[in-house]
Image (cartoon, rainbow, N blue to C red):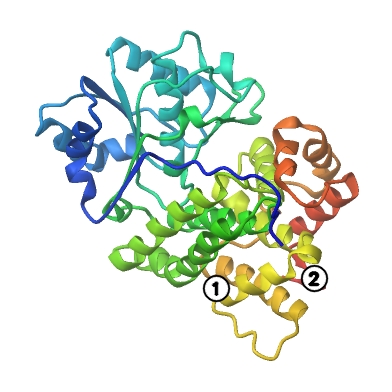
Amino acid sequence: MFPILKEVQYYTPQKIVFGVNAVDNISQHIKEKGWSGKAIIVTDPILAKNGIADRVVAALKKDNIEVAVFDQGKPEPDNIVCNEAAEFARKENGNFVIGLGGGSAIDIAKVVAQLLALPGKTEDYLKTTSFPKKGAPIIAVPTTSGTGTECTMYSVITFADDHMKGFFATPAILPDLAVVDPTLTLSMPPRVTASTGADALSHAIETLMAKQENPFTDAISLKAVELIAEALPVAVYEGDNLEARVKMSYASMMAGKAFNDPGIVEGHALAHTLGSVYHVPHGVGCAVALPYAMEYNMGHCMEKMALIAKALGQNIDGMNLRQAAQAGVDGVKQLLTDIGIEPTWAPFGKKEDIPMLVEMMTDCPWITAFYGWAKRPMTKEAATELLTRSYEGRLGDKLY
């Protein structure tokens, strides 16, 4: 049951443009917003080489918009690369920022836009997770279907000194404009398609388990799960299938919009733990954690799990509620396996590390922050169980 007496807030970009080849008209939307001056594109070396960055530059220049490109973004970005990008933007006298890429590039761009208007460095603000005011305009142009960061007020940034994943959480970094063009995702290789798609699936399902879920977020999340079940295996193994890419672009965006207020829960806590210690790619970490987080929340989320099973296409006719809920967990595990991700962190770490990981999951404020959105309290005993099961690949009484 959703919280009927609790006030909820919905944050979303001022404008979202979704469509095949929509990026080719990006300058039109910039002018409609009244922005002028120089655009700073924040992207990565791969997109700089494969022509996607050039496509955006050309779209800007055809309407005489000045542009400079920072192409040194990297996966799982830290404060150092954010500072480098911000210094580039300052030297180029940028007026607005375009994040072009996956979640990492857009997360860097969100920070850069703030540092164009504020003094100092990323780490000066990261410890408080916020900025004191809105910075330069931010445009998000995703080239993956996973994080949904084009619709969120979050930016995940690692502290370079200790490799701990931190984050910004403030409406100040919500993109002012999101341009979602599924054609930009056609170049994603299968492994990236799989891991980013698993991230989107995690956002949708963890939102359904959060304590502040509500009818609006439930509807968006369940539709995102349905689209992912239909399209993700096709997108992984038939990467040029535009229909599948369109569905995944919608699903990623919808899941991002859904979790923006209720937040995400234990699955991301476990994923951030694995990412901080073993540098597991974020989407893979989310995939590893998701079915175990679902079982952890089974007791109070059975109806939602049954709805998830139905959205995944599971045949739940004749099942009681608990059986249908377990079918949701099993369906998630099967979907992940189908796209080549086995839900276990055994390939990345050691079982004897579990006590250390438990301490991080229950004591580190960058991890425990996720439990503020959760319905169940997290204990050391529960963390031990989650970590052990997810290492062994044990769901219910089954060992996979």
Q: Please tell me which residue lies in front, 211 or 165.
A: 211
Q: Residues within 10 Å of mark 2 (few under 14, many from 20)?
A: few
Residue occupying the point 49% across, 66% down: 223
In the rendered image, the quadrant that contains the N terminus is bottom right
Residue 246 x %, y %: 33, 61
Mark seen at residue 295: none
Q: Please tell me which residue lies in front, 351 or 201.
A: 201
Which of the 4 image quadrants contains residue 51? top left
Callout 2 amino acid: Gly
Give above or below for 79 relative to 220.
Answer: above
Q: Is residue 362 left or right of residue 251?
A: right
Q: Nearer the viewer, mark 1 or mark 2?
A: 1
- The residue pinned by badge 1 equals 311
**Judging from the image, what secondary structure is the residue with disc 1 in?**
helix
Residue 307 x %, y %: 62, 72
Residue occupying the point 78% across, 36% down: 360
Farthest residue in the right direction? 381
Q: What is the CA distance from the residue labelled 1 to the residue labelled 2?
A: 21 Å
Residue occupying the point 83% across, 46% down: 378
**Judging from the image, what secondary structure is the residue with disc 2 in?**
loop
Residue 331 at least partly seen: no
Residue occupying the point 84% across, 37% down: 359
- The residue pinned by badge 2 equals 396
Residue 41 at least partly seen: yes
